[in-house]
Image: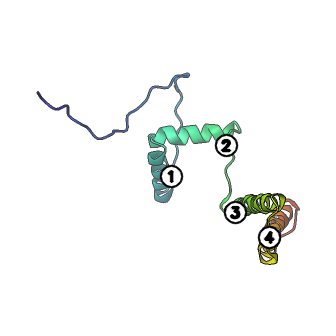
Amino acid sequence: MRKPRVFPEQRRRTRRNDEPRPHRMNLRLGDDEKAAIEAAATLARKTPTSYAADVAVAVAVGRLTPIPTNYREELRELVDARTALTRIGTNLNQIARVLNSGGDVTQEQLDAVLERVSEAVRRVDEATVVNMRRRRPGTPAY
């Protein structure tokens, strides 16, 4: 009996279930821009043309909002601060459980949690100030 052949996974064009796209638009791209779209399309398992069309339409109709490069660091900081606050909440719940069950919590443990709270709040405050400055006309956002 013959073994079935195993083929590597191929990127195939899929049929769209919605309306076909009869209209054509041409774009002019630089080498770096073309390479970026091709790389993103590969990650999305789409053709570069399909990827560019999907992203352009999503931005145009408001389903996708691009993040300017200079705001990415601010967003990353907010995400990191949110993660820190979630961890702090977990620590506080653990301390409360120990105290409610009659256990003891050391001053060192409380100080460590309070230090993390202060640091996370400081980071959120800084990101908030940057965001507010950016929204205020004539104020540099740094």
Task: Assess disc 1: are there few (<14), some (14-19) or many (≥20) residues with their C-alpha within 10 Å of its C-alpha.
Answer: few
Amino acid at the residue labelled 3: Asp
Disc 4 marks which amino acid? Val
Q: Which mark is residue 105?
A: 4
Instruction: Pinpoint residue 11: horizontal percent, then vertical percent.
Output: 37, 38
What residue is disc 3 on? 80
Q: How many marks?
A: 4
Q: Can residue 142 be seen in this view?
A: no
Residue 67 located left or right of residue 32: right
Tell me the CA gap for discs 3 and 4: 27 Å
Quadrant location of the C terminus? bottom right
Q: Are marks 2 and 4 in contact (CB under 8 Å)?
A: no
The residue that mark 1 highlights is: 29
- Labels 4 & 1 near each other (Cβ < 8 A): no
User: Which residue is disc 2 drawn over?
Assistant: 64
Cα gap from disc 2 to disc 1, whole angstroms: 21 Å
Which residue sits at x=45%, y=25%?
15
Query: Left of 12 or right of it: where is 119?
Result: right
Mark found first going from the N terminus, 2 or 1: 1
Q: Nearer the viewer, mark 3 or mark 4?
A: 4
Q: Where is residue 109 in the image (x, y as percent from the top left)?
A: 77, 73
Q: Which amino acid does label 1 sit on?
A: Leu
